[in-house]
Image (spheres, grey):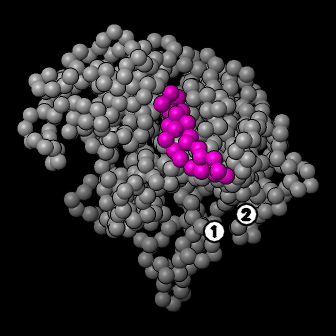
Amino acid sequence: MFAGTAAATATVALTGQPAAAGPDDEVDTGVPSPRLGGRPLLCEPYLLDPQPSSVYVVWHTEESGTGQVVLVGTGVTGMDDPAALDAATGQRGSGPGWRRVVAETRRLSRTREDAASAVPGRTYGAVVDRPVYRQLARVTGLGAGRTPYRVVSVDHRGRATVSAAYTLAPAVPRRSPVRLLLTSDHQLKTMTPANLEKVAETVGVRLDGVLFAGDLVNVPDRASEWFDSTTGLAFFAGLTGRGRRTIAGRTYRGAPLLQHTPLFPAIGNHEVMGRWSDTAGLDSQFNDPHPVEVARARWLRDRPQGVDEATWLAEQSWDVTTYEELFPYPRSAAGGPRWWSRTIGDVHLVTLFATQIWRSASPTGRGKFQEAQADLADPDRWGYGQFIFEPVKRGSRQYRWLESELASAEARRARYRVVMYHHPGHGLGDNSAPPFTDPVQRITRDPVTGAVTAVSYEYPLADDHILRDLEPLFSSAGVDLVHNGHSHLWNRFRNAAGVNWLETSNVGNSYGAYDVSSGAARNLPDKPDHIRQGDPGGLSPVVPTIAPLTDAAGRPLPYVASNDITVFSVLDSAAGVVRSYRFDTRAPDSPVVLFDEFPLA
């Protein structure tokens, strides 16, 4: 079908120019004939930012290739792979029941691997660049309802990969009911594929949105954590049904959610890389961010040559480039992909960049509360405590945008208002303390030599930016739900103004609950500002309304914090409720249990 001149014409029609032959081609002249047999995509396609008549389709490959297209329309479901390839590479841009949309190709700028990477068939002795190419197509002209689509990727040798047929849709009309999956903190954790498989079994894969409250992976610049980690737990693998994890004799693959359901993500601390290095491992780089103001002071001091200030500051403080390139939409004029809002049916969603670097509470070494003794003479080696990446306190740029957004006509017209971000405001988890505030640095010096003898950090509870600044704004603006992550457990609260606070992050694992009912206390110094048990914000946790777990004495527990029981939650706006479900991975044949339901308003 694709021999000779027809093949050359087909490829030119797809890309606009003849394909360049690769180094391992048998011939180095002419254009290779498009044919099946290409390598698997790095990930199945995923959907972003539906608008009234459009949606973005995104997928990733290991080379730029000669053509990347989306086939859209009812006709694609009846196509076999050769017919889909013919449609993708033929001269016609459309046919009976289908049309072709060409994707834009862009190489991700910071994806790398290192000795700690787990890539099929490959090992790395040091940090190396790993080419990953983003294919992004905006499919326009969509009518109401779902439309089938497939993606076709042709590499430089003319080998094509054709996806299965999935469905996409434009934005849900305003004031229409929606179903939204609430999740976070997947981070390549063990139970995640089982969790997603049970989501699909319980509510299906064609939802109206996946609201992801941060911590998608562990180290954001490590490409394999997103795509093809041999653990079977890569981010896109689980959410597209390509994961693989065996628990108690049952193998779970996740579910094809993102191929059908648009992703609405927020930035967690694990989406933020630290200072760039050509030699240090990626884990080390991830754990080595500096505040932007510290990096800027060094820039003003040293005036580096041959690099612009913005690039230098990103490399010498912290960076979210990989996240922004993977998820360029949704975005706002003020915050880009970092903070934004969208109306999804009858739900108005506001997403913030509210997170901080996580540091150890150990009393020695660089951590939350002090610098390492060995580093005291060199401020470039300090960690500067558990500092906040992007300000969200009153008066900050992000706060001013949030204040305006919650007062907007768009937010006021919605039946429900949801705010999503990563760091907990109210919670029983370990990461709910110390307070979410700028560290107060105290430097002690030798009275004779002036040498630094100690650097410590304090976190005043009265200055918690979420409790002091955001919660009053949420209460006055009529926010119905705050959806956060970070502590890897399930718990919920309701304040006096009727704002519901939900963390439903016991997806892949847990780090425990710190409450009188558990008897556990957070590993914090014994100081008034450090709340070692319970919610630092002073609210009482709500016991699940239907089937709470119980302690050894049979008393109901107000949380789920388990490495065996996985949890997911679904916002059902038609019913006006959020439902939470649990599944015990120790008993693969056991049913999914609806254990909590609460009204949004």
Q: Amino acid at mark 1?
A: Ala
Location of the N terminus (image quadrant): top left
> Going from the N terminus, do you reach mark 1 or mark 2 first?
1
Q: Dot 2 surroundings within 10 Å: few (below 14), some, or many (20 or more)?
A: many
Query: Looking at the picture, how far across and down is residue 172, in whole percent?
Result: 54, 19
Identity of the residue drawn at 56% across and 60% down: 358
Q: Nearer the viewer, residue 286 or 67?
A: 67
Q: Tell me if 6 is positioned left or right of 220 in this view.
A: left
Q: Amino acid at mark 2?
A: Arg
Farthest top residue? 96
Asked if one can make out residue 311 in the rendered structure from this viewpoint, the answer is yes
Residue 361 shows which numbered tag?
A: 1
Farthest bottom residue? 448
Q: Dot 1 surroundings within 10 Å: few (below 14), some, or many (20 or more)?
A: some
Q: Nearer the viewer, residue 301 or 50?
A: 50
Q: Nearer the viewer, residue 31 or 537?
A: 31
Q: Which residues are magenta?
A: 239-263
Residue ID for mark 2: 522
Query: Looking at the picture, how far across and down is residue 484, in whole percent?
Result: 63, 43
Question: Is the residue 375 above or below the residue 329 in the image?
Answer: below
